[in-house]
Image (tube, grey):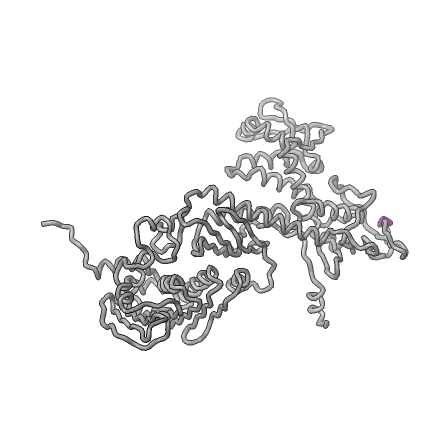
């Protein structure tokens, strides 16, 4: 007697439901996809308890007649695929025809639907996969699906559900993701008869702001056209949790490759531990991707993933550069003729202070700035003839922050972060051109290396030299350091060499980038360094000429702008 037996349709449906309907949010997602495929521009979701008591989704889509209502309850019955070839170019959210029968097999499901041109609609009720009633009924145009007692016949599934708050959060997240992909559709959510979410029809950018609750945040606009269209908006600075919503051909998906591409394009703007946040939308021919790779359709497989990755990286990087150019034009544009470059306080003389007159163009008496003699900083050389810009230097705060005024705004600049970014880009350019600016040591330094360090130095001798450190084997485990990068001559030669070796030993391909960032950080002017006025002006000038100046190479922001409205609000003015 054969041991293999065919499963009953009812048991097969319950097994399929385990793949499609993991939790109440899964049922909401499937019902929303059906409503959107039906062309609805208004969708209302009602939930009771954690979603297991009631899920009700109403829409004003095209609706169904009685025959379609009955067919939609059959497994693998769908209006979205008519032939096998369409499976390779799916353009709808749903396509398998298993969502409704799967949900119906583990709940009490009621469907009310009416065509727009029909006089009456149809109501069908299914209890745990068994059709109980079908009859004509008066109802609004569109479709209403009610799911009651979800998982009533699978108590084990209910035991694995989380708290009510967690399950409701998953439901709301599903709605937000679908709403982001369809800004031309209005969504509302009621939980226990209380409206908790109301998203009216809006533009794509406004819908993203509404979904992510970023009403006033300045966003980084992404735009790239071609066979693969990319657009979206990102927060200029990442956040610790990182919430990047991705839609591919209007389908919310989760994709590591796309997240990595966005992070790579934002390189230099994200601190360690931060992730990109915002919304990314990709549109291309359906046949260029396979969405039939996950039961819940959360994942996607690209035909040419490498090309997609490259396009996204380029689009994000160009957006970052465009934002830098806009900020540069805003901060470092040529000022009006009557504008004075520096406005520095006239501080009283004190013992040990050096008075430094400034070159200004004004009919008023020339102010003077008193400052302590700064620590040596080879890359911050004073300007002989300072260039004008729209930033007006006020002074230095806490020996760390430069205070500037610009068109009614207060601009606070972190001198260390700004200088670090400048030095990093100089080092990066020198490394890429294989023309490091080195400075010979007056007395070469010898140092003992561990065997593994000596082996690595011998193997990577040319790479170390490309970073500006010339070394020579002295014998045994001893090496001689003959030169250092010109920007790091005030650092310990041994420390510089060990940092380079540690970086070259790292397995990640970005080790050189991290090395240059580390060198720049150590060589930059530090917190506590009192700068001469000319040095502050030089720093501002170098910032204006820097390709990226808003963040240090480790992702920390360089400057913060406080508007006059913010300051008036602080002091209760106006």
Image coordinates of residue 493 in percent, x first then y, are: 66, 34
Q: Is residue 102 left or right of residue 542?
A: left
Residue that extends furthest to the front in the rendered view of this protein: 117
- Residue at point 85% right, 51% down? 360
Task: Please indicate, yes or no, whether residue 486 appears anywhere in the rendered image.
Answer: yes
Quadrant where the C terminus sits is: bottom right
Q: Is residue 449 above or below residue 361?
A: above
Image coordinates of residue 440 in percent, x first then y, are: 71, 29
Q: Nearer the viewer, residue 538 or 74?
A: 74
Q: Is residue 389 above or below residue 104?
A: above
- Residue at point 25% right, 60% down? 13
Image coordinates of residue 563 in percent, x first then y, are: 70, 62
Image coordinates of residue 321 in percent, x first then y, are: 62, 48
Please provide the residue range marked out in magenta: 352-357
Q: Nearer the viewer, residue 544 or 126?
A: 126
Residue that extends furthest to the bottom in the rendered view of this protein: 138
Q: Is residue 232 left or right of residue 8?
A: right
Magenta part, dominant SS = strand
Residue 354 sits inside the magenta stretch = yes
> Which of the 4 image quadrants contains residue 24?
bottom left
- Residue at point 22% right, 67% down? 130
Residue 17 sits inside the magenta stretch = no
Task: Please indicate, yes or no, whether residue 105 appears anywhere in the rendered image.
Answer: no
Number of residue marks:
0
Q: Is residue 317 left or right of residue 80?
A: right
> Which of the 4 image quadrants contains residue 151?
bottom left
């Amino acid at each position: 007697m054969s041991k293999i037996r065919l499963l009953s349709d009812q048991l097969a449906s319950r097994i399929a439901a385990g793949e499609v309907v993991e939790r109440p949010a899964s049922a909401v997602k499937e019902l929303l996809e059906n409503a959107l495929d039906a062309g609805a521009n208004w969708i209302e979701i009602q939930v009771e308890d954690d979603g297991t008591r009631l899920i009700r989704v109403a829409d004003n889509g095209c609706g169904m007649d009685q025959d379609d209502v009955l067919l939609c309850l059959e497994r693998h019955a769908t209006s979205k695929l008519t032939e096998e070839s369409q499976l390779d170019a799916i353009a709808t959210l749903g396509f398998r025809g298993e969502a409704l029968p799967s949900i119906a097999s583990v709940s009490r499901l009621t469907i009310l639907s009416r065509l727009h041109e029909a006089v009456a609609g149809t109501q069908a009720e299914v209890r745990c996969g068994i059709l109980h009633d079908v009859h004509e009924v008066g109802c609004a145009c569109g479709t209403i699906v009610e799911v009651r007692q979800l998982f009533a016949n699978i108590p084990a599934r209910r035991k694995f559900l989380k708290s009510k708050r967690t399950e409701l959060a998953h439901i709301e997240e599903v709605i937000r993701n679908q709403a982001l992909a369809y800004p031309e559709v209005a969504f509302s959510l009621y939980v226990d008869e209380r409206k908790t979410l109301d998203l009216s029809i809006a533009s794509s950018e406004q819908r993203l702001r509404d979904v992510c609750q970023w009403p006033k945040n300045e966003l980084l606009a992404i735009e790239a056209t071609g066979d693969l269209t990319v657009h979206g908006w990102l927060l200029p600075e990442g956040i610790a949790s990182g919430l990047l919503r991705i839609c591919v051909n209007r389908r919310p998906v989760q994709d590591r490759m796309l997240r990595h591409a966005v992070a790579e394009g934002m390189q230099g703007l994200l601190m360690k531990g931060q992730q990109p946040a915002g919304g990314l939308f990709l549109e291309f021919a359906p046949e260029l991707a396979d969405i039939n790779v996950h039961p819940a359709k959360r994942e996607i497989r690209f035909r040419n993933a490498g090309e997609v990755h490259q396009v996204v990286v380029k689009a994000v990087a160009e957006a970052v550069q465009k934002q830098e150019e806009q900020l540069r034009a805003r901060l470092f544009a040529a000022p009006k003729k009557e504008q004075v470059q520096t406005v520095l306080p006239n501080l009283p003389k004190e013992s040990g202070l050096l008075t430094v007159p400034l070159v200004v163009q004004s009919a008023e008496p020339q102010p003077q700035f008193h400052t302590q003699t700064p620590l040596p900083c080879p890359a911050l050389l004073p300007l002989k003839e300072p260039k004008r810009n729209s930033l007006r230097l006020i002074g230095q705060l806490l020996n760390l922050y430069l205070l500037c005024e610009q068109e009614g705004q207060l601009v606070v600049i972190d001198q260390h972060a700004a200088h670090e970014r400048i030095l990093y880009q100089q080092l990066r350019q020198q490394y890429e051109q294989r023309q490091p600016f080195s400075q010979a040591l007056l007395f070469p330094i010898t140092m003992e290396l561990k065997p593994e360090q000596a082996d690595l130095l011998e193997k990577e001798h040319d790479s170390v030299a490309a970073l500006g450190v010339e070394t020579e084997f002295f014998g045994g485990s001893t090496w001689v350091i003959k030169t250092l990068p010109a920007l790091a001559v005030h650092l310990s030669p041994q420390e510089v060499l060990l940092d380079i070796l540690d970086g070259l030993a790292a397995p990640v391909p970005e080790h050189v980038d991290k090395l240059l960032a580390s060198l720049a950080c150590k060589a930059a002017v530090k917190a506590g360094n009192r700068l001469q006025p000319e040095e502050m002006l030089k720093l501002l000038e170098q910032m204006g000429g820097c390709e990226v100046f808003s963040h240090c190479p480790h992702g920390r922001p360089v400057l913060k702008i406080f508007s006059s409205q913010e300051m008036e609000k602080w002091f209760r003015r106006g």
